[in-house]
Amino acid sequence: MPIDATRALAAEPWSETLAWDHKDVQLYHLGIGAGVPATDPAELRYTLESRLHVLPSFATVAGGGTGMLAGLSAPGVDVDLAAVLHGGQRVDVHRPLPVRGRAVTTSRIAAVYDKGKAAVLVLRSETADDDGPLWTSEADVFVRGEGGFGGERGPSRPAADDRVPDRAPDRTVERPVREDQALLYRLSGDWNPLHADPSFAALAGFDRPILHGLCTYGMTLKAVVDTVLGGDVTRVRSYRTRFAGVVFPGETLRVRMWDGDGRVRVSVTAAERGDAPVLADTAVETR
């Protein structure tokens, strides 16, 4: 059934209550590769409850990470999960995320773009607790086969500030993706079988399950925080990316970073596939 853009944009926002505690934070951190080496003090900040801080990308899974799935069942939206890919993600952090929290998130379809052979849904969410705003997030959801309805095409070029400089990166690190990384990450709430079931992955055109884009997103932010920001998660003001390619469990992420002007620009590639692009137009704005 085609997306009804007019109906989707006119739909009332929906709200849900999110709740999390240290176990959810620790599981998320383990799901994005934290804890290696297990006794490293820098890693214990992600894994040990007495020292725990919260990586801002946890906002994408807080409370079970059901926001994007809710958007895919909003009025005017009826799509096949096998045709859905996460196109991009942004999180703006208003203050440090607490280890234990209860908040309300209010979401809406902010835009529907017609890319010809596909549609892009822009899902925007505002999350706040009793003390005020916590974060704002925006997800671009790419739906194959749902374009061609005559809608606005939307932006097609990245912001100039997000493009990597034409010079060698200031830092390059590699982060291995474990064979079971997707199986562990999905326990934080994204149960799409694309990331676990080989037969479902085949329906989507892949020869094996792929890693969640948001897992790569979290692994990359952790690399930036640990490498450029001295391990201080509170320095992250915002973080945005465009998902440019897939990652398969067992591969290695090569993360290149350019630091300057209160922004870390990032490029992520799959090392074993000739530096095939994974994340593009990626930037972490810092405090």
Image (cartoon, rainbow, N blue to C red):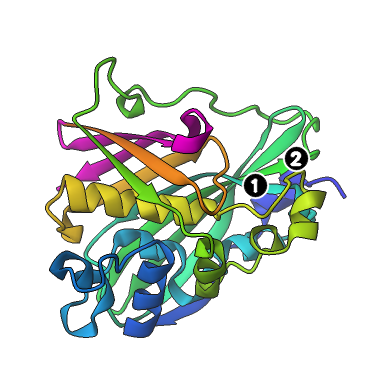
Please say whether residue 69 is visible from this viewpoint. yes
Q: Are marks 2 and 1 in contact (CB under 8 Å)?
A: yes
N-terminal label among 2 and 1: 1
**What kind of residue is marked 2?**
Arg
Residue 278 visible in rendering: no
Q: Which residue is mark 2?
A: 144
Left or right, 4 with respect to 213, comes to right
Comparing 68 with 282, the one in front is: 282
Rounded to the nearest angstrom, the CA distance separating label 2 from label 1 is: 8 Å
128, above or below 136, in the image? below
Q: Position of residue 38 (x, y in %)?
A: 26, 72
Residue 254 x, y percent position in the rendering: 37, 38
**Is residue 278 located in the magenta-colored stretch of the structure?**
yes
Position above or below: 19 against 248: below
Residue numbers of the magenta segment = 260-287
Magenta stretch, main secondary structure class: strand
Please report the residue visible at 27 percent of the width from the left and 20 percent of the height from the top: 165
**Residue at screen point 38% across, 65% down:** 58
In the rendering, at what x and y percent does residue 37 appear? 25, 66
Q: Residues within 10 Å of mark 1 (few under 14, many from 20)?
A: some
Q: Residue at x 81, y 38 (%)?
A: 145
Taking the image as shown, residue 9 lies to the left or right of residue 276, namely right
State the residue lying farthest toward the top: 166
> On the rendered structure, is 135 left or right of 277?
left
Q: Nearer the viewer, residue 36 or 213?
A: 36
Tell me the kind of residue under disc 1: Leu
Q: In this figure, which residue is indicated by the disc labeled 1?
A: 85
Q: Report helix, strand or loop for mark 1.
A: strand
